[in-house]
Image (spheres, helix red, strand yellow):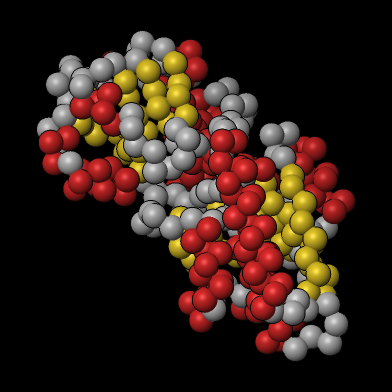
Amino acid sequence: MKGSWLTFSLSLTLIFPFILLAKPASLLIGYSKNLLPPAGLERDFGQGFQKWIQNVRQNEPSTIAPTLFTFDCINPINCAQELKTKKADVLGFSLLDYILMKDKVDYSGSFIATPLEQSIPIAHLLVVPAKRKITKITDLNGYSLTIPPDSGGANAMLWVNTLLLKNKKPKADKFFKDIKTTRHHSDNRSIYDIYFQKKRAIIITRFNLDVILRQNTALEKAVKILNTGPPHTFGVVAIRNELSEEKKKIIKALFQSPDSMPAYKQLFNLLEVKDFIPNDGTFIEPTEKLVEEYKKLNNGNQNGIQIPVK
């Protein structure tokens, strides 16, 4: 979910004036590179982001001095050391980053980020041509596969690799003819390969598939859902445990009522985020179980879980 947690960092410049702090307060914020936009969209995203900042500075005096940095969790050991050294107040994790890192750093996942054009929980579907004789994932050997970008693609690959290993097949990069990543989450052009019954399977969210079928009813008989993945979300906002209760309270308050701030909603739209909701484990536990299942099937190691998809 591209940069979703960044909504939090920029919203500070809007909401903190109402807290009446005497002087700018420092706040160190880190975010996972897995939450950045796909490479082809980074320029457009960056330009929109800068315009929004300029608008805020012209209309609202800032009473906080946020500092931002990115981190990379492809190597969990190095990532944990970096995060312990920097001691950020708030971290924005992709879902898999958070699951792999939560026992290595002293942070608690307080909120999950929900995407603008999705329903919660998010469920990935493995969709195939209906007229081909496909009854199980092993029938897709030699097919092409299309997956979502960024952290959504990493979640999808974990799920598909687990399905393949359960069926005693090689992982996706060896099993499928090729794997294509869509440019963004609403890029659904590959569905037409399914419509024309080509040898392609796609991973798509249930929400996106429902939208497509409502817009083009002719596709209904052309597609078949082969498998449904576990419910999940994309992003997790984590707060450092050793912060004072007062500072934790202020940070948590920022996520409670974004609708009262028009500019806050403007940034939500820019970052394609619907809102943040308190984390009660509902949307994290199914993927935690999937990670454990994958590790057991993969000879006890987590190699291949965190696949950067751009």
Residue 264 occupies quadrant: bottom right
> Is residue 72 toward the left or the right of residue 211 in the image?
right
Compare residues 56 and 134 and report the one nearer the observer. Answer: 56
> Is residue 243 toward the left or the right of residue 217 in the image?
right
Is residue 202 positioned above or below 237 on the image? Answer: above
Residue 250 visible in the displayed image: no
> Is residue 55 toward the left or the right of residue 119 in the image?
right
Q: Quadrant of the C terminus?
A: top right
Residue 26 occupies quadrant: bottom right
Instruction: Identify the residue at image location x=72%, y=40%.
Output: 72
> Is residue 162 toward the left or the right of residue 210 in the image?
right
Is residue 301 positioned above or below 120 on the image? Answer: above
Instruction: Identify the residue at image location x=59%, y=27%.
Output: 304
Residue 287 visible in the displayed image: yes
Instruction: Identify the residue at image location x=56%, y=32%.
Output: 309
The percent position of residue 89, horizontal first and vertical second, equals 76, 64
Is residue 129 positioned above or below 59 on the image? Answer: above
The percent position of residue 259, horizontal first and vertical second, equals 48, 77
Compare residues 161 and 22 and report the one nearer the observer. Answer: 22
Is residue 275 positioned above or below 144 on the image? Answer: below
The percent position of residue 109, horizontal first and vertical second, equals 62, 60
